[in-house]
Image (cartoon, rainbow, N blue to C red):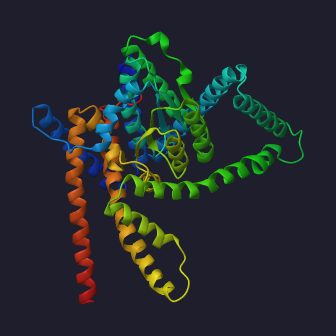
Amino acid sequence: MVQMELSNLLILLFIALVGTGLFVLARRVQKGATVRLRPHIGYNALQKQVGRAVESGQRMHISLGRGNLASAANASSAAALIMLDQLAEGSCASSMPPTITTGDGTMLLAGQDHLREAFTQARRATEFQPGLVQLQASETFPIAYAAGVNHVIHRETPGSNVLIGRFGAEIALMTEAGEREQADQLISTDDPTALAIAYPVTTQLMIGEEHLAAGAYVQGKPAHIASLQLQDFLRWLVALALLLATFYSTITALVG
Amino acid sequence: MKNGLPVLLAVVFGVLTLVGMLLVPPLGQMILGWASLLAAFALLLGLGNLFLVHLKRAIRANPYSLLLILSMGIVFLAGTADLLGLTENDLSQQLFEWLQRPLESAFSSLLAFFLVFAGFRLLQRRRDGWSVLFLVTVIVLLLPVPGAAANLFTVLRNLISDLFVTAGLRGLLIGIALGTITLSLRLLVGSERPYSK
């Protein structure tokens, strides 16, 4: 019944080691070890979005992408929900709730849950409407999703267009709609295609692992900070392994 | 207990899925099947949300919402007719091929124009070396060059694509993989709870 291959054993060992490292580093941070995060223009802008919406009197539009919480895009979508928390808490307290769109059913339910909680914390629970979070299309129809988001942007004329989560090339259509409405644009994603398109659109851009570091910048809990430290350490390990492998291959090729 | 139950379920099923995928494949596949079923139900709820939002707007005489409601009805009826064997050909598939696909293709064709506009705006917004490098790289990679310079551009194109683009992409993907590993670990131990507020 139990099949144990060497590769699976190595994976389990890796998970155990990384988990132990995460625990040790989180304890250090809990006990008061000082860790300073690199300032990031995107996360600084994220914190200012609510104020910008209140000053301009225009709502925020937030799109959570089309990543499914039950798929490989789980991590990207989870990071998007963390950022949604910060945006929703501030904007619901100021009676300017955001309009939220998504291209996936699981993100719709999670988004409604987070928004409802934000209204509850702002003591405005009765003002929550499920229609503030809208499914535009299934994740298998990216263009239809972009068309739906475009319609929302042109109808709502938001002051800010915040795109966080898993997108593809269809993000070009959404950012163009934001440009035409002269909305301030903030993009956070881990998809290389979407990043290439987002780069010329805005400087408020979270790239790849910066998107996945949302927890550390937004919530700042010990486990989040410890994760970033662990990532840095693992990155150096990977770089060292790549260099050693290249050196070994070169030597082997030269020696024959 | 109300707040603890989602976390407990997430941790238990997360660990069970991990154990299943590594040690007991049938267990892992069964749980993933349940997850797919839940995602399908979530999509069904999403369709209900879409219908209700647009129904309210259609009642207020919004033409686009009315069109969406009508389209949903027509496709639903077409699918039902196909299921009941009332149609000879696959009517819902034909609707998709003759309406949905051309519309999506037309919208997709706008991507190229929007990307060109974004390139122009990049120079207006950020006039620095990186912007120029970005645009020059895109031009070198995409534009066909006739004549004697074609060979040189092909070499340049291959160098940029095989060396710089591949290296950058791999670095980006390694970073994403490391971020995904740590975030997933936090989800497994219940430290990260995007599903529960």
Relative to the observer, which residue lies in front, B88 or A14? B88
Q: Note whether residue B196 is visible.
A: no
**Residue shown at the point (52%, 38%) measured from the top left:** A181
- Answer with left or right where residue B6 lies relative to residue B103: left
**Residue shown at the point (51%, 48%) measured from the top left:** A171
- Answer with left or right where residue A162 lies relative to residue A23: right
- Residue B178 appears at what percent x and percent y? 31, 51
Q: Note whether residue A121 is visible.
A: yes
**Residue shown at the point (20%, 34%) measured from the top left:** A222
**Quadrant of the rendered structure where residue A39 is?**
top left
**Residue shown at the point (73%, 23%) measured from the top left:** B61
Relative to the observer, which residue lies in front, B173 or B153? B153
Q: In this picture, is B1 found above or below B131?
A: above
Q: In this picture, is B96 found above or below B3?
A: below
**Quadrant of the rendered structure where residue B38 is?**
top right
Relative to the observer, which residue lies in front, A241 or A4? A241
Q: In this picture, is A48 found above or below B156?
A: above
- Residue A203 appears at what percent x and percent y? 36, 48
Specify the quadrant that holds the C terminus of chain A: bottom left
- Residue A200 appears at what percent x and percent y? 42, 54
Relative to the observer, which residue lies in front, A83 or A175? A175
- Residue A163 appears at what percent x and percent y? 45, 40
Q: In this picture, is A89 found above or below B168?
A: above
- Answer with left or right where residue A192 lies relative to residue B77: left
Label tally? 0
**Quadrant of the rendered structure where residue A60 is?**
top left
In the current view of this chain or complex, which residue is farthest to the front?
B124
